[in-house]
Image (spheres, rainbow, N blue to C red):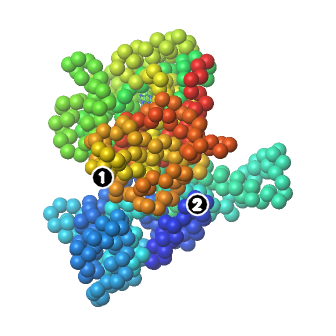
Amino acid sequence: MNFRELAEYFNKIELISSRLEMTKILAELLKKADSENIKKIVFLCQGRLGANYEKTESGLGEKMVIEAIVKASGFTKKEIEKSFREKGDLGLAAEEFCSQKKQASLFSEELNVKKVFNNLIKISKTEGTGSKESKLKLMAELFNSASGTEAKFIARIPLENLRLGVGDPTIMDSLASNLLEEGKQNKQWIKEIETEMKEKKIKEKNWKEELNRKIKLKLREKIEEKYNIHPDLGLIAEILKKKGLKGLKEIQIQIGIPIRPTLAERLNSSEEIIKKLGNCIVESKYDGFRIQCHKDGNKVWIYSRQSENMTEMFPDLVKAIKEEIKTEKVILEGEAIAFNELTNEFWPFQITIQRKRKYGIDDKAKEFPLKLFVFDIMFLEGKNLMNETFTERRKALKDIIGNGNTVALTNFIETDSAKKLDEFFEESITNGLEGIIAKDLNAKYIAGKRKFAWIKLKRSYKGELNDSVDGVIIGYYTGKGKRTEFGLGALLTAVYSEKEDVFKSIAKIGTGLTDKNLSELEKILKKISSKKKPARVESELTPDYWTAPKYVIELRADEITQSPIHLAAKKDGKGLALRFPRMISIRQDKKPEDATTEEEIKKMYEKQGKKE
Ligand code: ATP
């Protein structure tokens, strides 16, 4: 496929704010893509150069992209910088200057997707001395042959700021809708769906549409199942293109490829938890960071909750995993937390999080050694354990985890008594932990989903919601008075609607922001701000600047209230909002789609203040 054609699709998608429309155009694009290009096209739609868990940073900053535009267009650095300042988007500046290049080059050629993708990959892989020049040359080569529209997107991809607003769920919906004809051949599905539709007395005039919708949902489920154990939509799209739905069988759990994590639900009290789960395992909730560890003989991978490869950050854990886990091939999960060996106490989260770093790794590892508390296992010696019960998985864990220096099992009790659960909860709090997580003994490992297999209970602070909310920043207001110097006064935040794959406003936050927070935030937000409401954002409030939904912040609030101005969980003209929201931290370990969901907010609202 020509890159021009892809850029035109991107142009169309960029202008759309309706998600349905976006899904339709994306489906059309993916239908057109041939099997050689589809993987690359999916990655480019995601604004990436590889699967979600692959590191593909370009190492190109704005300065170098500007230099490349200078080289290809013949305009001066000053002219380009001025346009960038005015437009706030280097993509738009690239578009302006590459559409009116001063010098016609002999080496100009028509760009195709493969060429652009390969150059960008080369840019990301070039390292060491002379790499700056090579990167610049590869980038200038692309601008040299690019039209204005093509240049806009070529500039944005290595800066990780594509601005299409396409989320993974939308890509999955588009892939599903392209499989409709194949889905219709599945007699079993049709039978099930038709029976359900008859029961629901669906009218004849709506019959076909509803049938197609339900088939697409089934297809989407099949795709998502694979995405959850192998989060590589490029590969999934390629297999679907080559082999159709049956090809998905090829995608299995694989050591080295992260599984999307299972997530915890909330309940308000030990009584509610016991009522829901009966006899269950109750584990301490350690306040560190979650890691998924993969071991294949002497090779170890460590992934974050976000499926980012963090192996290099934790040499101490890698060593301990090799030495202390008594098996060859395994995928397991646990919470890593810094431990103070002098006092025999856990360090608070603010200390543990310092271990997530790119530089000074060894020194920090000595200063704040980590302990890994293992709580689940998904794969053991060639066998997928995800469909086993938690009881079985726990048994498997016991066989391979001893009481090592660094790796140990979580502290737990098994009980069906709310009183015992409460006692264990208090003990965990006294030991400086966050609370407990109760686990359903019969549940499978449910990748990528928040289900009642795990239920968390945290300490509630007086007059506050007993859990924090992770909101996505969708815009900001410029400051007044003292804050003017930072240019940032308040933030507009949203929660995520999983069903619709959009972000709906929930709170405007002016407090809890320290000056340090403010200037840090302003820097990163400025790069993704615009005067136009981004795709997939729903808000009736209009901030001074919109920002693409990218950053997640942790919020505390007194309660959730109904509000006529916010759109989260809107019903009968009223949405839900946070009352007295305060920012606690920037959650760098969360993607916007991992923020608190609209569904969760609704549940938190309903449960608020209720005690059984
Ligand atoms: P999310 O549920 O989206 O992960 P979060 O990151 O804000 O949200 P919580 O919901 O408060 O975290 O709690 C779930 C997290 O608790 C897990 O992702 C894991 O990192 C951590 N955790 C600590 N101890 C345990 C344990 N024993 N079992 C499972 N998870 C634990």
Residue at position x 45%, y 47% in the image: 492
* Residue underneath mark 1: 523
Amino acid, disc 1: Lys
* 299 displayed left or right of 461: left
* Mark carried by residue 612: none
What is the C-alpha distance between the residues marked 1 and 2? Answer: 29 Å
Determine the secondary structure under disc 1.
Answer: helix
Asked if one can make out residue 269 in the rendered structure from this viewpoint, the answer is yes
Where's residue 73, x and y in %? 28, 80
Above or below, comparing residue 513 to residue 372 in the picture: below
* 253 displayed left or right of 273: left
Asked if one can make out residue 410 in the rendered structure from this viewpoint, the answer is no
Of all residues shown, which one is farthest toward the front? 481
Q: Nearer the viewer, mark 1 or mark 2?
A: 1
Where's residue 338, x and y in %? 28, 28
* Residue underneath mark 2: 18
Quarter-of-image position of residue 406: top left
Above or below, comparing residue 83 to residue 528 in the picture: below
Amino acid, disc 2: Ser
Residue at position x 61%, y 30% in the image: 606
- Of the image marks 1 and 2, the number of the one nearer the N terminus: 2
Dividing the image into four equal quarters, which quarter contains ligand 1?
top left
